[in-house]
Amino acid sequence: MHRSIAGWVTHHWVKWVVAVLGLVTIMAMGSLGAKLTSVQDNDIASWLPGDAESTKVIQRSQAFSNPDDIPAVVLYVRDSGITPADAAKATADIAQIKGVETVTNVVGPIPSEDGKALEVLATIRMSDDGWEDLPDRVDDITAIADRDADGLDVRLAGPAALGADQAEAFSGIDGILLLAAVGIVFIILLITYRSLQLAILFLLCGVGAVFIAQGLVYLLAKHADLTVNGQSAGILSVLVLGAGVDYALLLVARYREELHHFEDRHEAMAHALHRAAPAVLASGATVIIGLLCLMFAQMNSTSSLGPVGAVGIACALLVMMVLLPALLVIVGRWIFWPFVPRFGDPVKSETGLWARVGQRIAKAPRAVWVTTTLILVALSFGVLQLDADGLTNEQSFTKEQPSVLAEQELAKHFPGGAGSPVAVIADGTSADAVKDAFAGVDGIDPASVEVKSPEGSPVAYLEGTLTSAPDSRAAFDTVDRVRDAVHDVPGADALVGGNTAVNKDVQSASSADNRLIIPIILAVVLLILALLLRSVAAPLILLVTVVLSFGAAVGISALTFRHVFGFEGADSSFPLFAFVFLVALGIDYNIFLMTRVREESLKHGTRKGALLGLAATGGVITSAGFVLAGTFTALATLPIVFLAELGFVVAVGVLLDTIVVRSVLVTALNLDIGRHIWWPSALARTDGPVGASDATRTAEPVGAAGGGDRPS
């Protein structure tokens, strides 16, 4: 049976074929993955909900404004007052700025009412590479404006400048994150296994899985219209490396255990695969299905992450369940040096740290799980400190950005929304009525409202300037008032868009996605656990522990964000992303633990099975948790608050999950509830070992049994 299921990977000559094909695939797909940036879609439409009002404005206004056009505001400030020479310089700069590559239009100079500033509005047309070229264009314009400034404070503001800062922040995201994650994982593996060569093998396979995933995502983006942006590409490398090494740890832990029972390493690996693969595949399938649930999201950036992440997890499973076993069998037992597992030696997990922890829990399991639950509930109240209503431009970065400082200076001298107008599309015959309604809205500079479309056009395109900062709550409220006003114009069929409307629609769609997708993921996880464990009680109990763990992790993180890091809030999509990664990845540890507990319970009874399951898996689950936490911590290397917060909450949640929830809370519940946790399976009807027929019938679906054919 073992040979028929897993032996082909470790066959005496097939292993070499698997290894060669695997390494060739890594190199080939790695070369394709290097092109992933070229197919990323970072324009605004790749992030927006398709049916949002602001998205429709972008689509309908293409006859009047190119959706690839993005405004930049060149700001000239002299605190003592603008001089004629300053105005002459700004005018001369305009002629040069018009010659900058991809600049399509320049307007100005426009003086401020206080006489201390001038602004020049330059329109940059983004190339097919999206925002990747913005930093160069912004640098070109800045160089012109800075030349012979003679005391003028020159800054570049507006959407183009912000886009350039964002592009710089995401620049090289794949390489930076992968290097940071590899370094962190390497240190953790060395500490865990104290084996240099084993750590290198883990990383070879982990990075190989990343290369294959990036190459496959590139092909899907190029030929199957899969949307990939900088955010999903960055998360992909971290997710694949972290999850892949987790799966490798589980397999290697079981392989190491089987090497004590089998002299032939090929047989040991066949048995290890037969026993570990079902749990690993079930875990991976749970993550894949959980990620695919994101496809229900309104936000394009969120829904596109689902298939991107799912492809990555599938690649991690393929490498760790096929290539890694072949390589381990090829290199032999020495890969574990200096702690080489010898045939016939006792398995230390039965007397190790987690075995002792289990014995302590067994003395008062109810007191342990009640106390642990109360602590987790108390920590969850920290969620009240989480302000997930969106971030302003300033709040979106972990350090000061030139565009944000320029925007603040711009607001001192011009209306807050200068360079980022509110756009309105309406029926051409209602242009005058819509203009009057638009100009009469509180928060819009009435003098700025004008019709940009040609006279007599069937569609009217209007723009107006906000009096408040375009990323502020006040600006969002103004957009609401504009919508109410122009929607009430009879027959106008008016729609409101622009950058501020886009940001508002993003926040609204993200909040709606949270309410929709989180319950779907919970239902999917519950169903998978029920099918895997052949139980109703255990999945329900485990799901409660998952929610407790998530609440406590977010509570701890929210307090840390506000009182330690000084972050002002969180993106509205943060709860959903945190939930997906913590629940989908955290459920792995439930599966690792409970499939082993079930296996041992079939042979030894429920109580002893719970203790043996913890003793056997406690160490590997803890190691896996540290690896996954370490890889997500790498997200903090980027100056983006959303990714820094996501990396922190996943790291905290995973460590909480592996050290406290899985190993302490779930074990205590297993011991206190006893056989009833397996209701309605055969295990729920006896406190002792299940009979041979029941064991076979109950265990085979999860692949957990099969320990009876070890040599004596």
Image: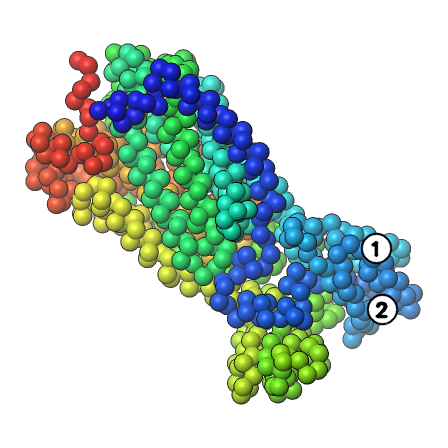
As shown in the figure, which amino acid type bears the numbered disc 1? Ile
Q: Residues within 10 Å of mark 1 (few under 14, many from 20)?
A: some
- Give the side of residue 620 with respect to residue 411, left or right: left
For residue 81, the mark is: 2
Percent coordinates x, y for residue 322 in the rendering: 38, 28
On the image, the x and y values in percent for residue 317 come to 39, 35
Residue 502 x/y as whole percent: 56, 66
Q: Residue furthest front?
A: 223
Judge from the rendering whether residue 539 lies leftward or rightward of residue 101; answer left or right: left
At 47% from the left and 19% from the top, the residue drawn is: 196
Judge whether 98 appears above or below 116 on screen.
above
Q: SS for tag 1?
A: helix
Residue shown at the point (19%, 26%) measured from the top left: 706
Of marks 2 and 1, the one in the foreground: 1
Distance from disc 2 to disc 1, alpha carbons, whole Å, reads 21 Å
Q: Residue at x 66, y 80 (%)?
A: 457
Quadrant occupied by the C terminus = top left
Disc 1: which residue: 144
Percent position of residue 520, x then y: 33, 56
Along the horizontal axis of the image, is 80 left or right of 598? right
Mark sitting on residue 187: none
